[in-house]
């Protein structure tokens, strides 16, 4: 069986890389390396050595120019120590079937790089972005997520509704056009939706939908299902005691490690 090697990128304001790496280990990844972005540029490390790439949460470049905008430009135009465009590493990683997870700031980076939703499997073409929350404030709260059972997403296959915390100021999906928004819905690329904790159904109501995302969008996948970006933080719920109601003895959902476990199980079976 394949041994899964996971790379968790850090640097330039990333701040949840250690929790994310810990969650990947708990989920069964045999090797988990926390790597600074600069080490990719100097070619001390290459994405080709891994099967699972994670962009964790944080505040890349202080969210100057917009969340993850500066980081997206860095990925698109930097060259490595051998004068190869850094973007080519990402392209090769995707083409060989690697899995990519972007959490919060990592999700913001994925949409601004054009890796999500990648309608028509067109990568590196920006189709949506993530803008300021409708509340015009930083949202730090627990939310309920409804999983789309028809989504091609590898990470969410067979999962029940999930509870996770959010902590962001720019989490509202803004599509380039209404057609893109509807196409994402029709192709089941909205893998996770903000849900009413009472009914378990998608909602636009605040604060259950903390940023006002249309179609209750909390997480997107691409047509292959190999890439997932979400605003909530699964790594912040890697153990039952992370949940505010754990002492009650009955939780609303299992820990967020299940997203990681699904991904690692998928890779092991390849």
Image (cartoon, grey):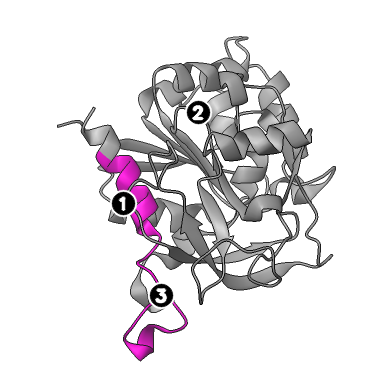
Observer able to see residue 13: yes
Q: Nearer the viewer, mark 1 or mark 3?
A: 3
Label 2, label 1: how many angstroms apart (C-alpha)?
A: 27 Å
- Label 3: which residue? 252
Front-most of 36 and 71? Answer: 71
Q: Crowding near pointer 3: few (<14 within 10 Å), some, many (20+)?
A: some
Front-most of 134 and 91? Answer: 134
Q: Is residue 127 left or right of residue 259?
A: right
Q: Nearer the viewer, mark 2 or mark 1?
A: 2
Which residue shows up at 68% across the image and 66% down it?
A: 210
- Label 1: which residue? 25
Which residue shows up at 61% across the image and 26% down it?
A: 119
The kind of secondary structure element at disc 1 is: helix
Q: Is residue 265 left or right of residue 104?
A: left
Relative height, residue 223 to residue 156 (above, below): above
Query: Residue 36 sits in which quadrant?
Result: top right
The kind of secondary structure element at disc 3 is: loop
Q: Crowding near pointer 1: few (<14 within 10 Å), some, many (20+)?
A: some
- Label 2: which residue? 223
- Which residues, given as a range, are shown in magenta? 242-265
Which residue shows up at 52% across the image and 39% down it?
A: 188
């Amino acid at each position: 069986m394949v041994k899964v090697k996971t790379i968790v990128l850090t640097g330039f304001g990333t701040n949840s890389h250690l929790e994310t790496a810990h969650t990947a280990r708990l989920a069964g990844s045999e090797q988990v390396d926390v790597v600074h972005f600069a080490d990719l540029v100097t070619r001390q490390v290459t994405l080709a050595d891994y099967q699972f790439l994670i962009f964790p949460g944080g505040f890349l470049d202080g969210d100057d120019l917009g969340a993850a905008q500066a980081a997206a430009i860095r990925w698109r135009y930097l060259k490595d120590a051998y004068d190869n465009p850094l973007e080519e590493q990402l392209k090769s990683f995707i083409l060989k079937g690697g899995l990519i997870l972007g959490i919060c700031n990592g999700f913001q980076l994925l949409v601004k790089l054009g890796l999500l939703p990648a309608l028509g499997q067109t990568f590196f073409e920006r189709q949506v972005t993530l803008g300021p929350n409708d509340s015009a404030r930083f949202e730090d709260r627990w939310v309920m997520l409804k999983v789309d059972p028809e989504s091609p997403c590898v990470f969410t296959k067979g999962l029940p509704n999930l509870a996770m915390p959010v902590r962001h100021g720019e989490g509202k999906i803004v599509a380039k056009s209404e057609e893109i928004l509807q196409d994402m819905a029709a192709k089941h690329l909205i893998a996770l939706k903000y849900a009413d904790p009472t009914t378990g159904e998608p909602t636009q109501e605040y604060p259950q939908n903390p940023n006002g995302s249309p179609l209750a969008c909390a997480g997107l996948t691409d047509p292959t299902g190999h890439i997932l970006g979400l605003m909530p933080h699964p790594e912040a719920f890697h153990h039952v005691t992370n949940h505010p109601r754990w002492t009650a003895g009955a939780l609303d959902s299992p820990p967020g490690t299940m997203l990681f476990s699904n991904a690692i199980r998928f890779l092991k079976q390849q």
